[in-house]
């Protein structure tokens, strides 16, 4: 299935095929979700079949909205598709922009809407093996240090989020 994502081309938002946007390093829309519970964040390890950054640990969920898809709708859809998580209320935290080389000649130049949700105790994700090979609840308090110790095991965007945007993502909104 060909997916067209909202991408800026010559200053205008246009639908561009997802792989092409990454091959050309075009600036495009994305979403990232962080699911929290009791001082921990749910991380996923990307499936080995992913076309970039396979086998690396990432935030709970991230993707690109389809052309004309609302970011919150996209975040909710992808949580269910990747991790079988539904019914968790998501809160918009901020929009951030980053550019990262993700290997294989691909570049993510993302304008990301970030959402955070709190998952109740007793509810666990059910990973879609086409998308996710593993999940872990990891304490927020040590995550940044772990990423600094073993950066090669984490996606570039998770490293950027923790380095540049942790306060926006993880501190409660006022």
Image: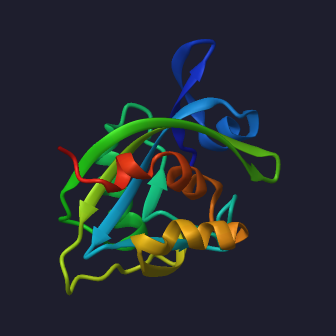
Left or right for 135, reference 123: right
Q: Is residue 27 above or below residue 121?
A: above
x, y percentage for residue 128? 46, 75
Q: Residue at x 34, y 79 (%)?
A: 125
Q: Residue at x 45, y 81 (%)?
A: 136
Q: Residue at x 38, y 49 (%)?
A: 167
Residue 50 picture quarter: bottom right
x, y percentage for residue 91? 23, 49
Left or right for 22, reference 145: right
Q: Is residue 136 above or below residue 143?
A: below
Q: Residue furthest bottom?
A: 122
Task: Quadrant for the C terminus, please.
Answer: top left
Q: Residue furthest right?
A: 105
Left or right for 166, reference 12: left
Q: Specify how the rendered protein is coloured.
A: rainbow
Residue 156 picture quarter: bottom right
Q: Residue at x 57, y 45 (%)?
A: 2
x, y percentage for residue 141? 42, 71
Residue 110 shows in this picture: no
Image label count: 0
Q: Considering depth in this image, is 174 or 60 the residue closer to the camera? A: 174
Residue 40 picture quarter: bottom left
Residue 88 shows in this picture: yes
């Amino acid at each position: 299935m060909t997916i067209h994502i909202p991408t800026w081309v010559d200053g205008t938002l246009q639908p561009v095929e997802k792989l092409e946007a990454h091959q050309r390093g075009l600036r495009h829309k994305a979403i990232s979700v962080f699911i929290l519970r009791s001082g921990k964040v749910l991380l996923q390890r990307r499936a080995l079949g992913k076309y970039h950054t396979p086998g690396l640990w990432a935030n709970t969920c991230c993707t690109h909205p389809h052309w004309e898809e609302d970011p919150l709708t996209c975040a909710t859809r992808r949580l269910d598709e990747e991790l079988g998580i539904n019914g968790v209320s998501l809160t918009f935290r901020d929009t951030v922009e980053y550019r990262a080389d993700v290997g294989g000649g691909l570049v993510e130049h993302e304008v990301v809407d970030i959402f955070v949700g709190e998952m109740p105790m007793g509810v666990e994700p059910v990973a879609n093996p086409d998308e996710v090979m593993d999940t872990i609840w990891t304490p927020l308090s040590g995550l940044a240090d772990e990423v600094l110790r073993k950066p090669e095991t984490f996606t570039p965007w998770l490293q950027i989020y923790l380095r540049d945007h942790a306060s926006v993502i993880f501190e409660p909104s006022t």
